[in-house]
Image (cartoon, rainbow, N blue to C red):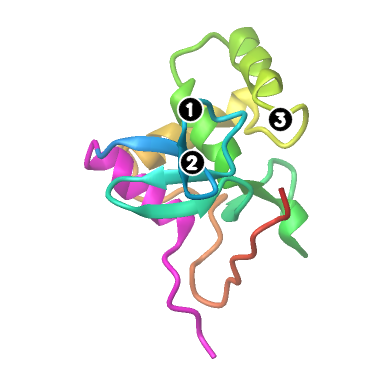
Amino acid sequence: MASTSPDALISLRQAIRSKNPITYANGDSPCSSLLNATHIVLGAGASFPKSASTRLRKQGVTTASGIQDYHTLEAVYLAWLLRDAPGGEYMKQARENGLAVGFVSVTERKNVVDWLEGKVAEYERIAPLVGMFIISRSV
């Protein structure tokens, strides 16, 4: 049976392009920091586990074989949130937010941000939505 769940990556892009508020939650309660959050809330109620796998393939992965080959929603969101930070500061903030590994690379960040903001229509590292299973990782 096909899932009718919204795609986390498209939902994030829509929230960014629409300038909808992006907040954090820990379970059902609002939370003030991404580090302590379990969910990212996009706009008016679309909530996703921050560990949800997206369709953005990690750098160096040409043929993805499992969720470990894709970035989490948290990693993609941090790339956008820290889009203006210098590379070293971006990597420091990613580590401080719990992403010692798995963050969007400094060299890939601009392309991801451009796609999220709608400056480019497509990005080759994003897997097609058709046939893709979105699976949440345990927190």
Quarter of the figure with the N terminus: bottom right
CA separation in Å, label 2 and label 3? 18 Å
Q: Residue furthest front?
A: 29
Secondary structure at numbered mark 2: strand
Q: Amino acid at mark 3?
A: Leu
Q: Residue furthest bottom?
A: 1
Dot 1 or dot 3, earlier in sequence: 3
Q: Which residue is located at x 49 percent, y 20 percent?
A: 82
Residue range (magenta) = 1-19
Residue marked by disc 1: 110
Secondary structure at numbered mark 1: helix
Q: Are marks 1 and 3 in contact (CB under 8 Å)?
A: no
Q: Amino acid at mark 1?
A: Lys
Q: Which residue is located at x 40 percent, y 41 percent?
A: 115
Q: Nearer the viewer, mark 2 or mark 3?
A: 2
Camera-side residue: 106 or 33? 33
Q: Nearer the viewer, mark 1 or mark 2?
A: 2
CA separation in Å, label 1 and label 2? 27 Å
Residue 118 visible to an observer of this rendering: no
Secondary structure at numbered mark 3: loop
Which disc, if any, is residue 99?
3
Dot 1 or dot 2, earlier in sequence: 2
